[in-house]
Amino acid sequence: MGKKMLAGGQLKDALLHYSAAVDGDPSNYQTYYKRATVLLALGKSKSALPDLDKVIEMKPDFNAARLQRGNVKLKQGKLDEASTDFQEVINRDPTNKDAENQQKLIKPLKIDIKEAMELIEDENYNDAIALLTRCIEICPWDPELHEKRAECHIAQGDYLKAINDIRPTTKLRNDNTEGYLKLSGLYYNMGDAEESQIRECLKLDPDHKRCHDHYKKVKKLSKQMSSAQKYINENKWKECIEKSRVMLKTENKVNAYILKAHSHLCHCNMKDGNIKEAFSECNKVLNMDENNIYALCDRGDTYIINEQYEEAVNDYQKANQIDKENSRVHEGLNRAEKLLKQSKKRDYYKILGVKRNANKKEILKSYRQLAAKWHPDKYEGADKKSAEKAFIDIAAAKEVLTDPEKRSKFDNGEDPLDAEEQAQQNHGFHGFNPFESSGFQFNLGRNKFIYPKLDETQLEETLTSGHGPGGQSVNKTTNCVVLRHKPTGLFVKCHESRDLNVNKKLARIRLQEKLDLHQNKSRSLQSMAKKDAARKRAQKVKKTNERLQKLAAFKEREGLS
């Protein structure tokens, strides 16, 4: 029955069968040997040895058991004990080739191990690793060989390979608290504050001081790291900055955590608009890791906020050379290049004299001051035309920068008030301005798109009193323009300026946008722009998910999950 189970691969059932047989007849050396064979097949060499010892004690001339025990001892690295067993088999059976071949391995192994130890002392780690690897192929259950090779990998800074050597020693040595402590330390030095391995150490010895101290530190740092990441996910930049500084106080020696903390400080200071601090922290990261894509992108964004577009393009170009598939890099480079080009044209931030990270309150304050200065009816200079142009630019800047959607477009290198640019962005037109020509049309699949041209004969213009810029009451003149499109009934109001001509021009621009939305609906410039923005967001989410899936697969493949 046991033989049938063993032949059929039913090892656990076979083990139960032979254990029952041993209990039923403890004087039968054959059942001990068969149970040892099953245990070896299950990979339980430590449990198999007592059975083999029992067999040899009961029947010293049983060469098969002695040869099997010699093989186990050889794999465990107990070379002298293995050699004794092989020699006993040879003495009893000089024709036994298996024992003879195994015996021939012992002497060269001893020489290789001795030479490997000397190479380690001489810090010749590459040659030592090569020798130890050859020895481990013959003695895979020798914990000392794995530990020595791990030392070489650690000396070379290859913690992942060291982990692969230390991990089996936690099973090869009984109650290996030192192995679990070393394993946890390696994960920690890689930047993975792994708590599970150190918990295994404490399970074996709850009073182990070094394990307990390390566990406390790992738990504390893990909590701080989780909090910092949580604040990033919630856009709580000030809290992220504070928690990242705490991380540096907790761990200021292991580079992986120092780099992580400075990376958070680089990103969160940039997001919080702390330009000087962001540059400082991003530079610290790049001094430690010059190819850190996240720091290059964050510093690139900081350059953009600081209106240093050429520097931003340089950072994103370097990031693109490192990772050509990164969606954030592609979007950032595209944005930086557009902004560099845009900076040579009309810049709404410069028109209002505000920084790119200015809030709405700051924008409106600057707008009111400049609007009061450049009102054509208040302007004291001789060039009224220049004042009118300046005021139109100021009004346009206020319109764009106080509208989240338009501001987002402008921040990404598009001018939402530039009809030519919008046509190029959404419909593929080049060098054609719909505001300066009659209504134009083109095909979109089976549908036609026609951008509306205002016909003055279809407009009804009335004037009424209103409120001027900044809430100033206007009672003496009727300069609020109400412009209605008679065929559709659509209308707009405009009272941005005390200058009637300025308000008339602005009213016509806004009515034209409204007609486009009414007439073309989902094909309007505004709708197409929204769809394009949504498409870009979806692509970004998709690429982010793909990157996370690849990262998860890598961690699982490397045993880091």
Image (cartoon, grey):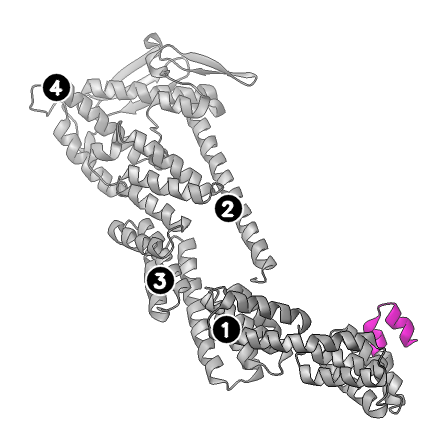
Disc 3 crowd, CA 10 A, few/some/many (<14, 14-19, 20+):
many
Task: Give percent across and percent down for residue 48.
Answer: 76, 81
Whole-angstrom CA distance, mark 1 to mark 2, is 44 Å
> On the picture, is 128 further left or further right than 297?
right
Q: Is residue 511 above or below residue 250?
A: above
Q: Nearer the viewer, mark 3 or mark 4?
A: 3
Disc 2 crowd, CA 10 A, few/some/many (<14, 14-19, 20+):
some
Task: Give percent across and percent down for residue 191.
Answer: 45, 64
Q: Secondary structure at mark 4?
A: helix
As drawn, the residue found furthest toward the right would be 1
Q: Is residue 94 above or below residue 481?
A: below
Q: Earlier in the sequence, mark 1 or mark 2?
A: 1
Give the residue at mark 4: 384
| Range shown magenta | 1-15
Q: Secondary structure at mark 2?
A: helix
Whole-angstrom CA distance, mark 4 to mark 2, is 53 Å
